[in-house]
Image (cartoon, helix red, strand yellow):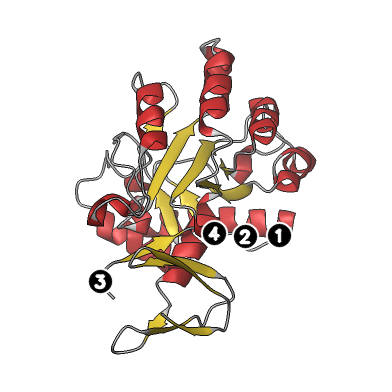
């Protein structure tokens, strides 16, 4: 085995995901747009705001978000900037939010998006990112989306609790970067690292389209990202679970066999040959 690359479901080499905050009532129109183009989004919700004026109700979240395969994630019970809080307050914000969402929607919720400042602008200089992450891990939060570091590396996260999106939808380079992402050639004729899997991650707030009177921008972004045969359209937690399963593959010492102990079928490219390793299966290359 010379070269090994993870591939997403059905052997796809690219993935697109979205993450939108706050569960304002504009999410209904936005989710309809996503559904039209076959995109998947993680909606980050502060439960203390549910049912308030201009925010979604639980029934609307069920009907317009969850019923269409989108994800619901934690955004802090009261939407307070995580870095400004004492450890006990972080626990309250995250745990109360998680329990409320899980009980309301009868599901297990493990995702998180940092409210306000992300993890880039902590107001408390004595409280480090490492300590915040320690609390999140203790609360079984498996990923945390941050903000304000837009870039076109299209990289998979190396630190799940500092998951950096590709871009906000108002980034002036957004269409240039989408074209660049879609043009990437991961075919077997490419050399080595150029064939690594890629991710395009869009984030924002749906109410911004209304505030900026630019819903057509969101429509154009969704249209450009959609319908690509080499792209897996997934929620944040689906990506986390798939990559975690891939990293659980067990290889023989000489690299000629692999066993998949997980419940997820995994795809990988070994020396330019595509393999599917089913759940519980062992194969030889």
Q: Which of marks 2 and 3 is nearer the N terminus?
A: 3
Q: Earlier in the sequence, mark 1 or mark 4?
A: 4
* Dot 1 crowding, Cα within 10 Å, few <14, some 14–19, many 20+: few
Q: Report the residue marked by disc 1.
A: 103
Q: Give the secondary structure at mark 4.
A: helix
Q: Give the secondary structure at mark 3.
A: loop
- Residue displayed at 45% across by 41% down: 80
Q: In which quarter of the image is the N terminus?
A: bottom left
Distance, label 4 to label 3, CA atoms, is 22 Å
Q: Report the residue marked by disc 3.
A: 2
Q: Give the secondary structure at mark 2.
A: helix
Please state which of residues 170 and 184 is positioned toward the viewer in this rendering. Answer: 184
Q: Quadrant of the C terminus?
A: bottom left
Foreground tag (4 vs 3): 3
Distance, label 1 to label 4, CA atoms, is 30 Å
Q: Report the residue marked by disc 2.
A: 99
Distance, label 1 to label 2, CA atoms, is 6 Å
Residue at the outermost front position: 189
The image shows residue 74, relative to residue 10, as above or below, that is above
Q: Give the secondary structure at mark 1.
A: helix
């Amino acid at each position: 085995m010379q070269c090994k690359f993870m591939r997403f479901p059905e052997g796809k080499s690219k993935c697109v995901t979205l993450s939108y905050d706050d569960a304002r009532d504009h999410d209904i129109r936005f989710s309809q747009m996503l559904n039209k183009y076959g995109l998947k989004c993680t909606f980050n919700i502060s439960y203390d705001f549910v049912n308030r004026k201009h925010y979604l109700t639980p029934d609307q979240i069920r009907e317009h978000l969850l019923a269409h395969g989108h994800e619901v994630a934690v955004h802090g019970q009261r939407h307070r900037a995580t870095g400004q809080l004492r450890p006990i307050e972080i626990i309250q914000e995250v745990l109360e939010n998680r329990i409320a969402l899980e009980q309301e929607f009868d599901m297990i919720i493990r995702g998180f998006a940092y409210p306000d400042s992300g993890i880039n602008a902590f107001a408390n200089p004595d409280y480090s990112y490492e300590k915040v992450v320690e609390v999140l891990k203790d609360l079984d939060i498996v990923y945390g989306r941050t903000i304000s570091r837009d870039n076109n590396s299209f990289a998979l996260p190396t630190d799940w609790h500092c998951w950096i999106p590709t871009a906000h939808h108002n980034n002036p380079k957004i269409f240039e970067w989408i074209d660049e992402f879609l043009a990437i050639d991961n075919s077997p004729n490419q050399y080595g690292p150029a064939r690594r899997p890629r991710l395009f991650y869009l984030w924002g707030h749906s109410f911004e389209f209304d505030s900026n009177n630019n819903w057509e921008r969101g429509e154009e972004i969704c249209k450009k990202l959609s319908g690509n045969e080499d792209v897996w359209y997934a929620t944040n937690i689906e990506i986390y679970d798939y990559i975690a399963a891939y990293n659980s593959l067990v290889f023989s010492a000489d690299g000629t066999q692999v066993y998949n102990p997980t419940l997820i079928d995994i795809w990988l490219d070994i020396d330019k040959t595509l393999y599917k390793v089913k759940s519980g299966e062992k194969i030889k290359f």
